[in-house]
Image (cartoon, grey):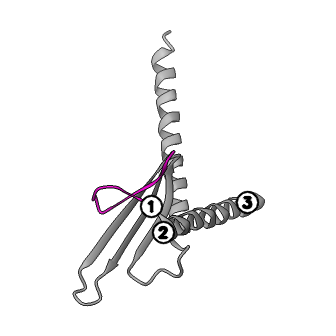
């Protein structure tokens, strides 16, 4: 009896479950992060989250007040040893400086505080 194919299939399923779990965590954290800057208007969507050790993402969708047309903006922040680089809407990267860099740092601190608080509450209920 050859158990190797069965073991490979089991490992594959385990890896897929881990990927799905990680995606669910990021999605949950993105929702929390989207509320950092106040209530989200009806029909809009905001997400702010840590994608990996070096990447933060701000994603926002809304309807233009004049045309009603759906607008989408994604901002990516890449953390580098010499600073934070920002790219908006697929444009080239530029370095965060001054007040914008301080605001980004405060957003990360608030995000971490809220996400950890949410996980603490979830673990206390469990």
Q: Which residues are magenta?
A: 81-96
- How many numbered marks are there? 3
Extreme residue toward the right, this view: 124
Q: Is residue 6 above or below residue 50?
A: above
- Check whether the beta carbons of the residues at disc 2 and disc 1 lie within 8 A of each other: yes
Extreme residue toward the front, this view: 98
Q: Residues within 10 Å of mark 1 (few under 14, many from 20)?
A: some
Extreme residue toward the top, this view: 1
Relative image position of residue 102 (x, y in whole percent): 55, 67
Residue 45: quadrant of the picture: bottom left
Viewer-nearest residue: 13 or 24: 24
Identify residue for label 3: 120
SS at mark 3 in the image: helix
Q: Residue at x 50, y 62 (%)?
A: 30
Relative image position of residue 101 (x, y in whole percent): 51, 64
**Marks 1, 3: nearer the viewer:** 1
Distance of mark 3 from mark 2, alpha carbons? 30 Å
Label number found at residue 31? none
Identify residue for label 2: 100
Q: Residue at x 73, y 64 (%)?
A: 121
Viewer-nearest residue: 50 or 12: 50
SS at mark 2 in the image: helix
Q: Residue at x 73, y 57 (%)?
A: 123
In the rendered image, residue 33 lying in the magenta stretch gets the answer no
Q: Is residue 89 above or below residue 83?
A: below
Q: Earlier in the sequence, mark 1 or mark 3?
A: 1
SS at mark 1 in the image: loop
Relative image position of residue 126 (x, y in whole percent): 74, 57
In the rendered image, residue 84 lying in the magenta stretch gets the answer yes
Residue 94: quadrant of the picture: bottom left
Label number found at residue 96? 1
């Amino acid at each position: 009896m050859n158990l190797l194919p069965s073991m490979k299939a089991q490992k594959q399923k385990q890896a897929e479950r881990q990927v799905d779990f990680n995606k669910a965590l990021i999605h949950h954290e993105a929702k929390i992060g989207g509320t950092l800057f106040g209530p989200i208007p009806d029909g809009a969507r905001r997400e702010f989250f840590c994608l990996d050790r070096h990447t933060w993402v701000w994603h926002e969708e809304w309807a233009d007040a004049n045309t009603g047309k759906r607008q989408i903006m994604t901002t990516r922040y890449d953390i580098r040893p010499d600073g934070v680089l920002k790219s908006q809407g697929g444009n080239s990267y530029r370095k965060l400086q001054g007040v914008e860099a301080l605001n980004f740092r405060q957003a990360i601190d608030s995000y971490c505080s809220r996400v950890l608080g949410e996980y603490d509450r979830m673990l206390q209920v469990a």
